[in-house]
Amino acid sequence: MERTGSTLGIGERRWVNNMLGALAWFLGLVFFFPIIWVVLSSFKDELDAVGDPTVVFHASLDRYREVTSSTPGILSFGQAFANSASVVLVSTAIVLSLAIPAAYALAIRPVKKWRDVLLFFISTKFLPMVASILPIFILAKEFDLLGTRTVLVILYTAMNLPLAVWMLRSFFQEVPRELIEAAEIDGAGLGGQLRSVILPIAVPGIAATALLCMIFAWNEYFFALQLNSANAQTIPIWVTTNISEKDNFLAKLSAASVLASLPVVLAGWVAQKRMIRGLAMGAIK
Amino acid sequence: MASVQFGEATRLYAGTTKPAVDQLTLDIHDGELLVLVGPSGSGKSTALRMLAGLEPLDGGRISIGDRDVSQVRPRDRDIAMVFQNYALYPQLTVAENMGFALKQAKVPKQERVARVQEAARILDLVPYLDRKPKNLSGGQRQRVAMGRAIVRRPQVYLMDEPLSNLDAKLRVQTRTELAELQARLAVTTVYVTHDQVEAMTMGHRVAVLKEGVLQQCDTPGALYHSPANLFVAGFIGSPAMNLVPCSVVDGGLQLAGGSLRFADGGPGATGDAVVGFRPEAVRLGQGPVSARIRTIEDLGSEAFVHLVIEHQGASTGIVAKVPVPFAGRMGDQIDLGLEGTCHVFDPDGPRLASGRAELVQL
């Protein structure tokens, strides 16, 4: 028999460990169940979707075809996807270009009163979104921005900026001070230090920050609904256009929901490794 | 290559009242390897960082060559620094690390490659040029950090405890190599360490700092044989100098049951003093004082014997360096004498007198 090391820690009992493992799996499945339900429903036809759940059903991609086929006068999937993608990418790019210098000023060469500045940044997130919608709406109307992608870019930038500054600051703080000093002595200016030392080391952190900003912007529903009822609607709004008052719509809505979640899930899956490294960077030396 | 001058250079950290470096005045000669040594908090690293331009001056000035660099940015000072943890750029290869400064200075690629190759040859790094720092051993990383400094051909090398992350054996070996390399390149070098053995073995001259104040700057031999004050006497040498509080009565010093007689008169003053003598000046087996052996450290080539004598009504520890084999055992009573250089210090620090002395019966 091959010798293997004990997987039990001192004082641990195997049956207790097994029970805890089973409990963890059970809880995981409980949380995952609604998602499985939505994914399964999206492959059913409308009648099956509202009927008693069955293990065996006739699976088809018809609902996906229905929700992605464009009907004149109704927001198409392609249009909504393009709107979302442009708003998300542009706002995230602006967030990063503003947050990187801000994080530098807060982490590497702290400005005076940097603690107050940091608190101010995060305090902007304390305000409920609903409380700010009236002034935002009036301003948007005044500047003729209602129903445009521009207003969403501005709002999503403002929404994600505090978070991005906080995250990037903690990642920048992990860059060893000696490296920056070595680059300075080696003749690199501010730009050179940022380009060749700080950014390469903080890449996982920057990737994690960018991904979170993209996810928050992609999922945002409230501002999109209030300010953008017309022709620049984003994916979350498009999902709700599949709710109908006359017929059964559960299967169609499920298909739309799956399509809306797919980019985020894919991005998260692709970036998983980097993101975990990035998010863990603050924790371990 | 250039000389370096500190002129009453002072650094006061924000929020503190006591300077980390207090009016440091120091002339470092062209091509010299000067070691700054002191316990932690002595300001040795701060002094080096002031020379690097990483710490601003709160008073005084620093010049490199004939140029006052007090207000010059680090990147314009033409210096290279080796950091304690090496500070290698993790995403760059060994070659890119070593060529980084040349690239910043816009040296043409051909020359850059040639200079990196040359430095790599000197440091035995040629097989590793394409590796990333994380795939190197500690000793190799240390050499890359050295290489990064060498390719620059700067006016001054600054080294901040560059060997303290190496294991003991490699440290001793690298110490020798580094001293050889410095002598070969003949570039003015300022080297910071807390290890007085490193300071004594490497430095052409050694500057001893304590609480931001320069205590003495001299050759290793002079520091050892003529320490300027109590602090230097106790800091330099391993095991440390024996320092025993005594009273001077009519130019004579009473040590336990003996009297210390100087060949050339000794200290003239009367009052409290501290007498200092190296472990090698202690003679065991004959002498006027009775001592008890506490422990024996046998190093093979020699032995350090830790003794206790009754002096001024209290037990006082004395260390003796004796040839091996040493016959005594722990707990034995043994006669103790003194023969060699003794120093007399004012209890406040400064050295009052030195000379050959002998311990005789009262």
Image (tube, coloured by chain):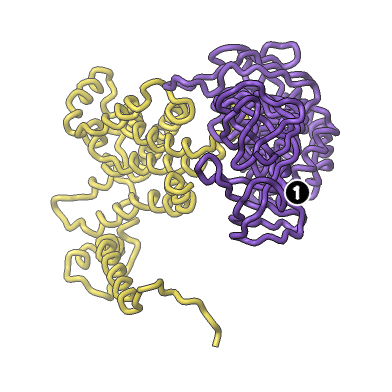
Chain colours: A yellow, B purple
Q: Nearer the viewer, residue B230 or B292?
A: B292
Residue A89 figure quarter? top left
Which residue is located at x 42 percent, y 21 percent?
B15
Q: Nearer the viewer, residue A272 or B158?
A: B158
In the rendered image, residue A237, in percent from the top left (x then y), is placed at 26, 42
Give the residue pinned by disc 1.
Answer: B128
- Residue B154 vs residue A247: left or right? right
Which residue is located at x 81 percent, y 37 percent?
B181
Residue type highlighted by circle 1: Tyr
Total numbered circles:
1
The kind of secondary structure element at disc 1 is helix
Of the 4 image quadrants, the one containing the C terminus of chain B is top right
Which residue is located at x 70 percent, y 25 percent?
B217
- Residue extending furthest toward the bottom: A1
Whether B132 is drawn above or below B69: the answer is below
In the rendered image, residue A142, in percent from the top left (x then y), is placed at 24, 17
- Residue B294 vs residue A39: left or right? right
Instruction: Sort mark 1 into few (<14), some (14-19) or many (20+) by Cα contacts within 10 Å.
Output: some
- Residue extending furthest toward the front: B362
- Residue A155 vs residue B53: left or right? left
Residue B41 seen in the figure: yes
- Residue B214 vs residue A90: left or right? right
Which residue is located at x 25 percent, y 23 percent?
A140
Residue B158 figure quarter? top right
Of the 4 image quadrants, the one containing the N terminus of chain B is top right
Residue A179 figure quarter? top right
Q: Nearer the viewer, residue B349 or A216?
A: B349
Chain of the residue that carries numbered disc 1 in the rendered image: B
Residue A198 seen in the figure: no
